[in-house]
Image (spheres, grey):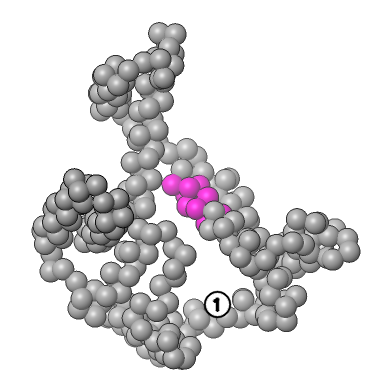
Amino acid sequence: MTETTDISRLIAIMARLRDPQNGCPWDQQQTFATIAPYTVEEAYEVADAIERNDLNDLQDELGDLLLQVVFHSRIAQEQGEFEFQDVINSICNKMIRRHPHVFGEASFEAVAAQSLAWEEIKAAERVAKGPGRSGVLDDVPSGLPGMLRAVKLTKRAARVGFDWPDTLTVLDKLQEEIAELQVEIAAGDREKAREELGDLLFVCANLARKLEVDPEDALRAANAKFTRRFRFIEAALSAQGLRPEQSNLADMDALWDEAKRVEKATPTPPPTGS
């Protein structure tokens, strides 16, 4: 296939992969539902490349994410619903509609006013979609990661005045939820403990929003820190000819504390690719 820098090449490749006679058996069998998890995964891999500041990897991951858009569009085209160009037209029209201060006559003196106008435009778009889609929370995707969706739901509610007044109030609520979780754990009620844990995590999402912290980003950083420190434990034990399962909790805790001391004494290296 002739190389071009045009999107038509990728569209043609996907059409060939989905060809009923000469395509790829795996690609032929896919549906919106079966490839949706890959779409979500590719978005996370884009975020990971950005976090690592690996621009070479970012280029590849953006290509993988674009492939997902082309894949969904091809399936829709086969069903006679829409095709890739319709997707392009849709997002172009949306961007023009949501930026009247750039493509129209509107003007805003402050970012806050622009943000308010953006939400008003989105609200009008929800109403235009018909009954059942006009609520404040109606177009917050249910497929988002739980913490991210919690932030988006409460941010939407906060815009219409349904919010805790300050961070200290959220902290008080956090303590309340911890106490309720402790009660259910002590009672041995697993299902109610699950519910209370969900409430606790929901409040944590609100706390992150109040602190203007992305909870997913904060948790990824905590995951990375845990991974670094546990690998330190593994390396230290390996130097003694041991594996973690051959050690004990007290020894591993001591090595964990040592890993923390080493991290505090060592300057943080620049991100990969910088």
The one of 7 and 174 positioned closer to us in this rendering: 174
Location of residue 186 with respect to 249 vertically, above or below: below
Location of residue 272 with respect to 205 vertically, above or below: above
Q: Residue at left 38%, top 30%?
A: 228
Location of residue 120 with respect to 213 vertically, above or below: below
| Residue 159 image offset from top left, x and y in percent | 25, 77
Q: Secondary structure at mark 1?
A: helix
Q: Left or right? Give the position of 223 relative to 4.
A: left
| Residue 145 image offset from top left, x and y in percent | 42, 59
Q: Residue at left 49%, top 79%?
A: 95
Q: Left or right? Give the position of 148 relative to 44.
A: left
The one of 222 and 132 positioned closer to us in this rendering: 132
| Residue 252 image offset from top left, x and y in percent | 31, 20
Location of residue 150 with respect to 183 vertically, above or below: below
Q: Left or right? Give the position of 269 relative to 180.
A: right
Can residue 201 be seen at all in this image of the molecule?
Answer: no
- Provide the residue designation for mark 1: 91
In which image quadrant can residue 222 be found? top left
Give yes or no for residue 50 being in the magenta stretch: yes
Q: Residue at left 35%, top 77%?
A: 137
Give yes or no for residue 105 being in the magenta stretch: no
Q: Amino acid at mark 1?
A: Ile
Q: What are the residue bounds of the magenta stretch?
A: 42-51
| Residue 43 image offset from top left, x and y in percent | 52, 57
Can residue 81 be seen at all in this image of the molecule?
Answer: yes
Q: Residue at left 61%, top 80%?
A: 89
In which image quadrant can residue 18 be found? bottom right
Per the picture, the main secondary structure of the magenta-coloured stretch is helix
